[in-house]
Amino acid sequence: ATRKDQQINTNMNANQDSTFELVPSDSDHPPIVEAVPTTDFTASGNEDENENPSDTDIIVGCGVAGLIVGGPCLALITALGGNWAKKKQGPFGESTRAIGRITHAAGNKAKDEKFLHKVKASVASLFDEQDEVQM
């Protein structure tokens, strides 16, 4: 029998010694089917832009990764190294371009959500509340 022809038996009986056994089901259960995705998430309208991220995206992404791992000195080294490695073939070039694509996507999301405006408004509201408390 193929997987689609198999049926799930969910009926169980409990014995006095607290063990369970499967009991044949009289009702018809729908066959097991696999979900098929309806959209292809790998294809995008701007593949050229995603394939080669900008210098700024690569430098910022590699610099932030270096800052998190080892501080400001490693941030400078990884930013410059990422800018050099972006043109190379192989794992270093691929990982650098991947970091650039991630940074580009994060930047676009921040622009869409107006993140900088929200941060400015939050900071301004902190100082407005302090002025009211001091008066």
Image (cartoon, helix red, strand yellow):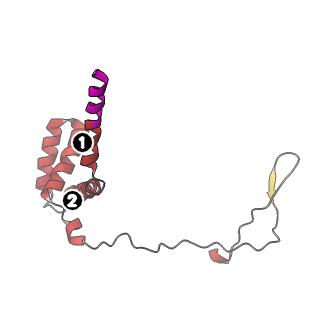
Quarter of the view holding residue 103: bottom left
Q: Residue at x 80, y 72 (%)?
A: 27
Residue 9 location in percent, x, y? 75, 65
Q: Residue at x 20, y 61 (%)?
A: 90
Question: Which residues fall within the magenta stretch?
Answer: 125-134
Q: Which quadrant does the N terminus fall into?
A: bottom right
Position of residue 126 in the picture relative to residue 37 (left or right): left
Q: Amino acid at mark 1?
A: Lys
Q: Name, please, the residue furthest toward the front.
A: 135
Which residue in the structure is indicated by mark 2? Answer: 97
Any magenta on residue 96? no
The span from disc 1 to disc 2 (Cα, nearest Å) is: 31 Å
Which residue in the structure is indicated by mark 1? Answer: 120
Dot 1: element: helix
Residue 49 location in percent, x, y? 20, 67
Which is the main secondary structure of the residues drawn in magenta?
Answer: helix
Q: Residue at x 20, y 35 (%)?
A: 71
Of residues 89 and 105, the one drawn nearer to the viewer in this rendering: 105
Of residues 47 and 112, the one drawn nearer to the viewer in this rendering: 112
Any magenta on residue 128? yes
Say if 128 sits above or below 95 in the image.
above
Task: Of the two numbered discs 1 and 2 on the same chain, state the one appearing first in sequence.
Answer: 2
Position of residue 47 in the picture relative to residue 84 (left or right): right
Q: Amino acid at mark 2?
A: Arg
Of residues 91 and 8, the one drawn nearer to the viewer in this rendering: 8
Q: Residues within 10 Å of mark 2 (few under 14, many from 20)?
A: many
Position of residue 18 in the picture relative to residue 70 (left or right): right
Say if 107 sits above or below 24 in the image.
above
Task: Name the mark nearer the viewer: 1 or 2.
Answer: 1
Q: Disc number at residue 7?
A: none
Quarter of the view holding residue 11: bottom right
Residue 15 location in percent, x, y? 87, 50
